[in-house]
Image: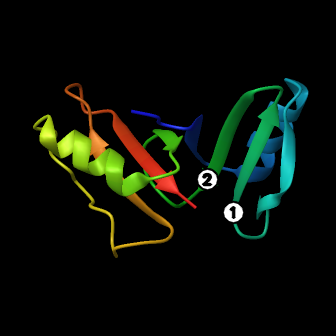
Amino acid sequence: MDLGLFSLSLAVKNIEVSKEFYEALGFEAMTSCGSIEEKWLIMKNGQTMIGLFEGMFEENILTFNPSDVRSVQEKLAAHGVDIDVPVKGDSGPGHCIVKDPDGNTLMFDQF
């Protein structure tokens, strides 16, 4: 199963402070992905990506960007994985959310 790109989506308290911190570690904001005004950013350092999200969710999320989220959801369900948030619609962009056995949230997000 190809899960695509991986990033960690961080629930931050202050996006400006968090942006400055991760810039100090060498991350750069991707200009086409969010903004300070929208309270979310995707930042990249080499092959490592993180998302900073202020006020959008309560926990950090492991995020995967597969090319076919519906196929991933189908395979997870076939293995008995409970789908907390299923993909909406039959085609195009979408996402599904599951929790691992320890309660960590995983999102599979096709855009």
Q: Which residue is mark 2?
A: 53
Q: Where's residue 9, x and y in %?
A: 56, 42
Crowdedness of circle 1 by 10 Å Cα count: few (<14), some, many (20+)?
Answer: some
Q: Amino acid at mark 1?
A: Lys
- Residue at (83, 26) in percent of width and height: 46
Q: Do the CB atoms of the residues marked 2 and 1 lie less than 8 Å apart? A: yes
| Whether residue 15 is situated above or below residue 38 in the rendered picture | above
Q: Position of residue 52 (x, y in %)?
A: 66, 47
Could you say where residue 14 lies in the image, as x and y percent from the top left?
69, 50
The amino acid type found where label 2 is placed reads Phe
Between the residue at mark 2 and the residue at mark 1, the CA separation in whole angstroms equals: 6 Å
Rendered position, 86 above or below 37: above
Q: Which mark is residue 39?
A: 1
Q: Earlier in the sequence, mark 2 or mark 1?
A: 1
Outermost residue toward the bottom? 89
User: In the image, is 106 to the left or to the right of 40?
Assistant: left
